Amino acid sequence: MRPCRGMQFISPLDGREKDRIVTYADVGEEGHLKGVLMGATIQREESGIWIIRISGALLKEELDAVQAACIGGMGQDKARVLVMVEEDFRGWLGGEVWHDTTFLVEHGDRIGKIAIVGEPQWETSILMFTGAGLRPTQVKYFTRNRLAEARAWVE
C-alpha cells in the first residue's frame, strides 16, 4: 500500500474522544481507497459503490475524514453510497460542530444516491442528519432485513 495525499483518517490515542489524531490513509493494491476509523470506515467497491460503516459514537472529525475520502476518490460519475449503521451505533457525540453544512453545499450535487441500512429506531434521526428531502441527492433508509434491496436501489 502507498500513502494517499490529502486524506485524513482519525483514530483514538487512548480511548478518550478528545484525544484523536490523524494516523494514516492508504490506497489498496487495486487503487481502491481504504481507511479505518474508530466510529466509521469507508471502502470503495469495484462496482464503484462507497461503503461507509458507522458504529459506536460518531465524531465530527470522523465524518469529515469519510467525506474527504469519498470526494478525493470520486470520478466523473455521481457517487453511490451505502451507509451501514452497525448494531452498536450510539449516535453522535455532543460538543461538535454538527451544524456545519460545508460538505453538503460544496459537494452535495456530486452524490447521486445514499442508501442507509440500520435499525428502525435510527431512521428518523439519520434521515434528518443526512438532510434527506433538503438536498438534491436521493436518500433512502432500509432496515437490516432489506440489505439486498438497499444495495439494488443504490446500484
Image (cartoon, grey):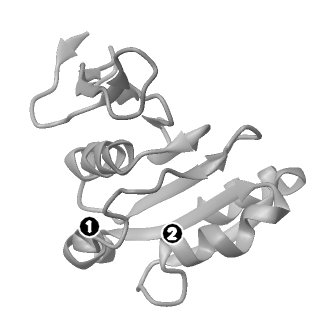
For badge 2, the amino acid type reads Lys
Q: Position of residue 55 (x, y in %)?
A: 61, 38
Q: Which residue shows up at 24% across the image and 19% down it? A: 23
In the rendered structure, the answer to whether residue 18 lies left or right of residue 130 reads left
Q: Which residue is farthest right?
A: 145
Quadrant position of the C terminus in the picture = bottom right
Quarter of the image for residue 98 reads bottom left
Q: Position of residue 41 (x, y in %)?
A: 48, 34
Q: Which residue shows up at 31% across the image and 30% down it? A: 10
Most foreground residue, 120 or 97 = 97
Q: Position of residue 121 (x, y in %)?
A: 81, 64
The reply to whether callout 1 and callout 2 are in contact (CB within 8 Å) is: no
Q: Which residue is farthest left?
A: 5
SS for tag 2? strand
Q: Residues within 10 Å of mark 1 (few under 14, many from 20)?
A: few
Q: Which residue shows up at 46% across the image and 46% down it? A: 50
Quarter of the image for residue 101 reads bottom left
Which residue does the numbered mark 1 point to in the structure image? 103
- Vertical arrangement, residue 69 with respect to residue 4, above or below: below
Most foreground residue, 105 or 34 = 105
Which residue does the numbered mark 2 point to in the structure image? 113
